Amino acid sequence: MNLVDRIVQFHHEIRDIRRDIHAHPELRFEENRTAELVAQKLESWGIPVHRGLGKTGVVGTIRQGSSGRSIGLRADMDALPMQEHNEFEHRSRNHGKMHACGHDGHTAMLLAAAKYLAEHRNFDGTVHLIFQPAEEGGAGAQRMIDDGLFEKFPCDAVFGMHNWPGMKVGQFGVRAGPTLASSNEFRITITGRGAHAALPHNGIDPVLVATHVVQALQSILTRNKKPIDSAVLSVTQIHAGEAVNVIPDSAVISGTVRAFTLEVLDMIEERMREIAEKLPVAFGASGSLYFHRNYPPLINHANETEFARSVLQDVVGDANIFEFEPAMGSEDFAFMLQAKPGSYIMAGNGDGSHRDSGHGMGPCMLHNPSYDFNDDLIPVGATYWVRLAEKFLAKA
């Protein structure tokens, strides 16, 4: 790997910052300590800082030369509402909160890149360092955009990166086009008529109706969607009743829908609404659908993805660059890619053997209570950020 020597030199400094952030996780839109730490570090390196964008977001800007070109580099800062199982020194000090997705590492990698770029400024243009809040369900990316992110900090392109357990450190996953799915949630309410369970003919059983609705929903994927179009419709909750001898008045079905294109998502929502509203009528009941679109699909732009690939070729070589298989997880960087051209890549986080003694018994996978970010990735990811910015803003 062609790592930046200077970044390797101050690796331990950034590692300590990463572990401090890990030990003090904050949930979406509550990243006050983390944001202040980020802002203070940037300012100490001579980087002007804008606080409070998207409530707790931070943007640092490094300008050099006379070019009007600009690039945005984004890292997320928030943690998850989980109890950490690890017992090593930098485990979470905040009960019920944990950096189980590596956002502490994402923040650290971008800080490492910021420190180097501020020191050397081997580019001509502007680098915007975007530290985003609330990726985990809060749509912090959209909140920053709504607050004028790209008006205040114009970007010709914007790039993101996520650690990926299972791939070795130094390996990267890259893909143009649909890469991560949209995230959507639904709630179907079935209204019947309550009765004594021993006298079911006096009521309209919403539980029975709900079972038929759940079965019918799966026909959307098997009979309405093209087999080559990927999508997931998962019913994850059915709530009804309070007593074993009472037929309840209503039942509620909840779950999630994932898809890679808006066309497929539109079709699924339309068919779900028809099933939810019309099928219960056949049983004498009524139904309604609440459908909420959380995050759109993450679709990488072709030119920017090939540019990212070319940078990685210089950093880790072709043998360590893999075609990323689309995943049904979601990521609100998708909002930024709707607003600006760009690309989002995956960086290998290893197999978990990097974890200090005292880690939990579970695997080192995302959203797992035994997860920990691999600090060996810091100089690798930071080198990518630096070379990406320098090549994008290459001096004439």
Image: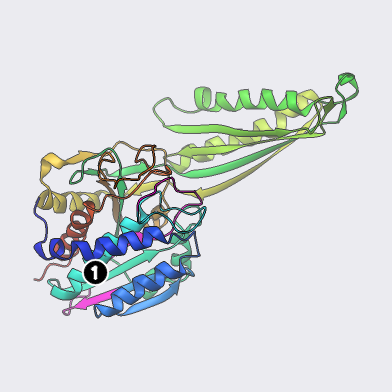
115 or 268, which is in the foreground?
A: 115
**Can you say whether 174 is above or below 28 in the image?**
above
Residue found 24% across the figure and 75% down from its top: 62
Residue 47 shows up from this direction = no
Identified by mark 1, the residue type is: Ala
Majority secondary structure of the magenta segment?
loop
**Can you say whether 169 is above or below 213 in the image?**
below
- Which span is picked out in magenta? 61-88
**Can you say whether 336 is above or below 271 in the image?**
below
For the C terminus, give its image quadrant. Answer: bottom left
**Can you say whether 381 is above or below 261 in the image?**
below
User: Viewed as shown, does residue 202 lie left or right of 192?
Assistant: right
Q: Any magenta on residue 365?
A: no
Picture coordinates of residue 165, whole percent (x, y):
30, 41
Residue found 52% across the figure and 38% down from its top: 257
User: Viewed as shown, does residue 79 lie left or right of 88?
Assistant: right
Residue found 10% across the figure and 45% down from its top: 317
Q: Any magenta on residue 73?
A: yes
125 or 2, which is in the foreground?
A: 2
**What crowding class fits label 1: few (fewer than 14 Cα within 10 Å), some (14-19), or many (20 or more)?**
many
**Which image quarter: residue 4?**
bottom left
Picture coordinates of residue 358, whole percent (x, y):
35, 45
Picture coordinates of residue 313, whole percent (x, y):
12, 48
Mark 1 residue element: helix
Name the colouring of the figure.
rainbow
66 or 384, which is in the foreground?
A: 384
Residue 90 shows up from this direction = yes
Disc count in the image? 1
- Determine which residue is flagged by label 1: 114
Residue found 84% across the figure and 24% down from its top: 245
User: Viewed as shown, does residue 134 lie left or right of 348?
Assistant: right
